[in-house]
Every structure is written in C-alpha cells, then in structure tokens.
Amino acid sequence: MLPSSHDDLLVVASLVVAILASFTALNMASRVASSKGRAARLWLLGGSIAMGLGIWSMHFIGMLAFSLPIELGYDLGLTAVSLLAAIASSAFALWLVCRRTLPVPRLVLGALLMGAGIATMHYLGMEAMLMSPGIVYVPAFFVLSVVIAVLASGAALWIAFRLRSGGRHARHARVGASLVMGCAIVGMHYTGMAAARFPEGSICGAANSGIDANWLAVLVIVVTLAVIAIALVVSMLDARTARLASSLDQANSDLLRLALHDNLTGLPNRVLFEDRLEQAIHKSQRDATCFAVLFMDLDGFKAVNDVYGHHAGDELLAGVAQRILRTKRGGDTAARLGGDEFVLLLGAGEPEDAAALAQRLVDEIVAPYTIRGAPLTVSASIGIAVHPSDGATAHQLMVNADAAMYHAKEQGRNGYCFFESAMNTTAHQQRQLHQELMRALERKEFRLHYQPKFIAPSGPVTGVEALLRWEHPGQGLLPPDRFLPLAERTGLIVPIGAWVIDEACRQMRSWQEQGHGDWTVAVNLSTVQLSHSGLVDSVRDALTRHALDARHLTLEITESTAMRDAEASLAILEQLAQLGVNISIDDFGTGYSSLLYLKRLPANELKIDRGFVTELAQGNDDAAIISAIIALGKTLDMKIVAEGVESREQQELLTRLGCNTLQGYLLGRPMAPERLTQILAVPVSAAPRISPAPRSSDRSWLPARPVAPSRP
C-alpha cells in the first residue's frame, strides 16, 4: 500500500472550518426557528448553503491535507455532487430542529439520515480522485466512520434544537457546542481517511484532467470563510434587528399598558374605564339591558397615610385592589380612578346582583390587613348607579354613583347605597362646601368661641373650652357639626386643628397678660388629629410661639377616639403628657370605659358626658352612674368636670356628688373672647353668672356632641 501523510497546518484549518461551520449552523437554526413564512424559507435556504458549504469545505480541506507519493486531483462533477449532498443534509437538519418538538424516534431517524448524507458526501469526495485501481477500505474503520457520522449528527441535532430559541447564555452555549460538533465532524472525516488504503501502483485519474490541488485549497478556504462570515454577519444583524424590534414592541406594549392602567395596582385607569363604560352603554342600548356602576371610596385611608406613611398606604391600596379582583365576576371591569377611589363596571344584570356584589365587597374590604407587620383596617363606602334609569351617559352615571357613595358615607360608612335623585343636590352642596372649606383657612374665616368652666358650684372661672365656628361669607356663623365631619373625611381637619391649637394658645397668653394666670384652655382633638404624626410637634410649636406654659393647655379626647387604636393613642398621649399639657377624657361613660386603658392613659381629668347630666334627678340611675364615675376618677387622682349643666338642680346635685368643675348653659354659653373679657370685667356682685341666657336660646352655640370627631 502507498504510504500517506497529512499537512498539520491544513488539518488545523479543517478543524477551524468545522467549528465555524457548526457555529453558523446553530445561529441559522435560531434564525429559522424565530422566523415565519417566506422569511423562514429564505433563512432555511441560506442556512443550508452556508452550513453545507462549511461541512463540505472542512472535508475537502482535510482531503487537501492528505498526500500520497503520487500526484492527486479531483473530478469536478463528483466534487459538485458531494457538495450538493452536504447542502441537502444541512437543509434536512435545519428543517428538523425547527419543528415544534423533537421526540426521540424522530431524533434517531434524523441522525441516521443526516449521518448517511455526511458519509455520502465524504465518500463521494474520495471517489472524486478517480483512483485506479480503486480505493480499498478497511471495513472496521469504514463502519466506525459511518457510526461517528450518525452519532455526530444526532448530537448536532439535539444541541441545535436545544439552543435554537436563544436566551441569556445562548451565545456562550453555542460556542461550547460548536467545539464539540466541530471535533465530532473532524473525527468522522479522519476516521474515514484512516479507512482508505491505496494499493501500490495506484494512479489518480483526476490528476491531469481535474482540479489542481493547490488552486482548490486556496479557493475552498477563501470561499468558505467568506460565505460563513457573510452568513454569520447577516444572521447576527438580523438577530439584533429582531431583538430591537421585539424591544420596541415590548416598549410600545408597556407604554400602552402604562397609559391605560394604574401603575400601583395594575387595574385599568380612568381612561380605559371610561372607554369600557361607553362600550357598555352602546351594548345596553342595542340589547335593551341594564348594568350597574359601583363607585367605591375607602373610609379612614387618610389616617393610614398620616400615621404609617405613604408607602404603607400604597401597599394597602394594592391589597384592596387584589380583594376587588378576587370578588368581582369574570366579565366585570374594576378600575382605580386615583387616590383611594375605585370603580366597578358590572355586566348586564338586575339591581339585586349589584347589591349582592356590593355587600360582598364591603365584607371583603373591611377584613384586617397586615402591612409591614402592623394590622390595619379600612372600610368601603359604595354608591351604585344603574343604567339607564340613573343616567344615560357615562358622565351622568359617574356623577350619580359618586353622589350615592357620598350618601353611604353619611349613613355611617362601611356600606352601600343606590342612587336617588335627591342625592345630587346634597352631593353638590357638599362639594361646594368642601371647596369653600379649603379656602376658609386662607381667608381667615374661622373663629374660636369660648365657654367658661367654673369651680363648683358657681365660680370663680377656672378656665375655658375653645369651640370652633366658621364665619361663612354667605351663610353666617356656622357651628362645628355643619362642617367638621366633612373636614375629617377630607383630611382638612389636620390643618384646621393645628390652627385651633395655635389660636387657643395665643388667646390664653393674652388672658394671662390681663391677669388670668390660673386659667386653662381646653381644645378638643378628633380621631384623625390624634393619629396624625405631626400632632406633638404642632402642640410644641404653638406653646413655644406664644410663650405659654404647657400646664395651661388641656387637650380633650373622647373615649372612642382614645380606644380606636389604643396602643397608638397611648404612645401619642404619653408624648403630649411629657410636654406638660393636661389630658382630659371627654364624654366619659358613653364609650368603651375600659378600666385597663383608663389606668394606663396619662389623663388627669374626666369629663362626664352631658347625656348623664341632662336627665339627672335625685335617686335615678344617672345619679348613681355619675357618683360611680366621680368615685373612680378621684381614686385615680383625676379632676372631675361635668358639662351640660342647664338647671340649678343639676348644679346642686353635681356639686354634692363631688364634681370639681361645672360647665354648661346655666353658667355661661360659648362666646367670642372679647365678649367674655367684657363680662369678666363686671364686678361679681353685679354678674353672679356669665350670661345666663334663657333656655330657649339658640343651642347651635353649644359644641356638637353626637359625633365625637366633629370637634377639633
């Protein structure tokens, strides 16, 4: 047999070409898999040519690296046929790996067919030398080369299928896979070459009439590298373009989602909701059906923001949104309009369906939340408007649902109301009042009147209670129950309450300069004020600004206010007590009357509710209750104040029972500070009581008692 040898440089070149061809094949598989229609067919054709040319080039560079002691050449026709075999095998491989699935039977069949194609290419290339006598193959190596071709094809198909979709680490994975596939292809080729034996005296029939080996080497290497380079560049540019297009599509989708959805909760926003509401109206008119709009507003959300911060408020809103989504039906649309306002568009149905869903929402939303380890509770007031009876247009439906929601708040909150025509007038008045209330502080329209407090039974005066009035430019002097509930709902109670504390301290300082150095001024705190994070600073600043000793300021809180969040209230009240201000528990006996918390609260005064005093008569139950309250207060070393004293019998009995201080209409009504100063200037003999006006006088001067938070 003729001795043979290989050019090491060309062997290395063949390995490099095989690796580049493998990398190109993996990239082409990705492009074919990610394309559709005509683009996919073009990528399949281009990929097949590039991949087939790469495999074929590796083979022929390896052939050119092979040398015998005779002149060699290659037949052009068989060489072209071997190239076609490589391209056909590559086309089949790309088509196969771009199927949706690649089960094992299909993988095995594909490996057999592709391996046979590669083996055909290789041995056709060997036959292109036109050796005479013919090449003798060692059966074992021949079979081994075919087996390697099949195994290499199977591995290549599996790797290409796994990496076709790309991903974060796909490029690095393809590089590693290309090394494995390239080595497998080279291994098949050189195993096949090892199987060939050339008898002594063999002649290459293509040596003179075929292709010159040196020319072929240069041509194959240059053309192959050019084709592979072009294929890779085009593939990568297309992939980048595709990624850019995908990114732009995603960006457009994100922008559209942001434009039509609430960023915090993910619910549709006002724009998208109004569009769906218009569609619902058209459908309802066409099908002669009805649907409902539920307008929801959270009760107590402002206090959550003030006490726990806006981050906790945002988490709470997201939690509410999830509960709304969990409660609504499949065809309903839930949206967030802004702040703590949500709205729900119900599909066609009866009003009873809307009522049932509204009740489920009320029950679901009021359940406690856990935000950052703290238990929080809010409730929902819901207004319901039904199309077409409650409005023919989207605007009418929303306005009427809003009016019904406001009415639900007026009825006690944590519930729902259907719209009625009379609600619109009330809602309009409340909205107008809200706007005017916002401007009242700027225009300095608020006034403080003061009701004197007397050492039992009839004096002297020991202090005053500050009571807020609004000097409305169109309606005159308004009592607190006309506007403070609205101020508390909207959060305006906080700046108004701060003004009340500051003005009361200023007036108290003025009275001290007039010689009333032993007086105290009492200011009522609402629930929202007590839970506001800036309360302590507001009190401290007012005392400092007016150089008022803290012991001359009394802060009154109701039992209900203190017990709403007992632990939080206790912490705030302890800070206030450390400033030196007096703490008075107002309306005692009407709320929780928890002795456990009463003992812990830093209070030094109990104020008996007017409800017990009004019906007070010798020997009845109210007398027994008052007696017990007085005994309890004195045991805890507290001063006892009775308010609502309107008769001499009440005055005498309360004094006999042990009250320290009396306050009420019998002894003195609320009045402007100037009027109070004038009356105090009159000698005691001439004015035993301060303005004992007839019982029939206007009771709107008295502080509002039915709703505790109505007094700042």
Image (cartoon, helix red, strand yellow):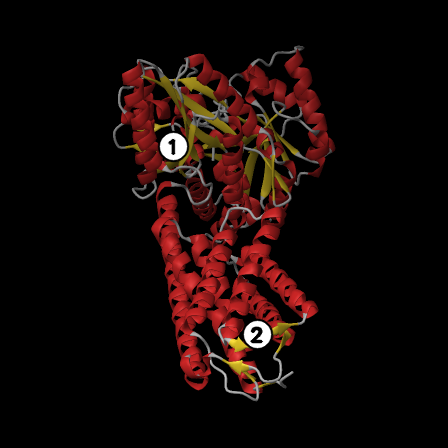
Which picture quadrant has residue 281?
top left
Give me the C-alpha separation between circle 2 and circle 1: 119 Å
Amino acid at the residue labelled 2? Gly
* Label 2 residue SS: loop
Report the front residue among 296 and 331: 331
Mark sitting on residue 134: 2
Which residue appears at 53% of the width and 43% of the height?
315
- Residue 524: tell me if it is visible: no
Q: Is residue 189 toward the left or the right of residue 233 in the image?
A: right
- Residue 156: tell me if it is visible: yes
> Residue placed farthest to the bottom in the image?
69
Residue 536 x/y as whole percent? 54, 48
Q: How many marks?
A: 2
Q: Are marks 2 and 1 in contact (CB under 8 Å)?
A: no
Report the front residue among 492 and 288: 288
Category of crowding for the residue at label 1, using alpha-carbon neighbours closer than 10 angstroms: few (below 14), some (14–19), many (at least 20): many
Does residue 468 lie above or below 147 as drawn? above
Amino acid at the residue labelled 1? Arg
Q: Which residue is mark 1?
A: 469
Report the front residue among 71 and 417: 71
Residue 213 x/y as whole percent? 46, 83
Q: Which numbered disc flags the more N-terminal residue, 2 or 1?
A: 2
Q: Is residue 177 toward the left or the right of residue 60 in the image?
A: right
Does residue 159 lie above or below 230 as drawn? above
The quarter of the image holding the N terminus is bottom right
Which picture quadrant has residue 418?
top left
Which residue appears at 49% of the width and 47% of the height?
310
